[in-house]
């Protein structure tokens, strides 16, 4: 209950949750960068393997199936899926942190407003 927290401690709570929001946002940015790099590497690997298979006179559908079945391509797709799942979790955590941060900020604003009204 925010009403039970002293004014002095309210600032500490705001600082704490603000720091956690910043930290989570930084981690999300790093993961998004990793996702971009991994997707690019995966596409390049897929394209090289597909081109190689087509050069061996395979039909495009057969070549795609063979390339998608390779361990390297499957592993890269798994890594992409893992990064995307981690991003979803981190974004959900960030939403929780932001809710707490915003609630504390609103409480500080409410108290300041009450103080201003009371003091004239």
Image (cartoon, rainbow, N blue to C red):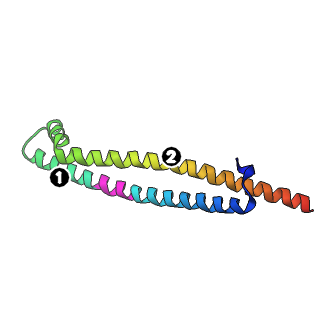
The residues bearing labels 1 and 2 have C-alpha atoms spaced at a distance of: 36 Å
Residue at 84%, 56% (x, y): give it: 114
Magenta portion: prevailing SS class:
helix
Q: Nearer the viewer, mark 1 or mark 2?
A: 2
Density class for disc 1 (Cα within 10 Å; few <14, some 14-19, many ≥20) is few
Density class for disc 2 (Cα within 10 Å; few <14, some 14-19, many ≥20) is few
Magenta highlight range: 33-40
Residue at 32%, 48% (x, y): give it: 80
- What residue is shown with label 2? 92
Is residue 38 part of the magenta span, yes or no? Answer: yes
- What residue is shown with label 1? 48
Q: Is residue 99 left or right of residue 45?
A: right
Closest to the observer: 9 or 55? 9
Location of the C terminus by quadrant is: bottom right
Is residue 59 part of the magenta span, yes or no? Answer: no
Of the numbered discs 1 and 2, the one sitting upstream in the chain is 1
Residue 72 position, x and y percent, is 18, 48
Residue 90 position, x and y percent, is 46, 50
Q: Secondary structure at mark 1?
A: helix
Residue at 65%, 53% (x, y): give it: 102
């Amino acid at each position: 209950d925010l009403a039970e927290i002293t004014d002095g401690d309210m600032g500490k709570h705001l600082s704490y949750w603000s720091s956690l929001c910043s930290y989570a946002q930084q981690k999300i940015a790093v993961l998004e960068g990793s996702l971009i790099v991994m997707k690019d590497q995966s596409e390049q690997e897929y394209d090289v393997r597909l081109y190689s298979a087509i050069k061996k006179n395979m039909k495009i559908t057969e070549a795609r199936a063979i390339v998608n079945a390779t361990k390297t391509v499957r592993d890269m797709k798994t890594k992409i899926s893992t990064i995307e799942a981690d991003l979803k979790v981190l974004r959900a955590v960030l939403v929780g942190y932001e809710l707490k941060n915003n609630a504390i900020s609103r409480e500080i604003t409410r108290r300041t407003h009450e103080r201003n009204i009371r003091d004239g």
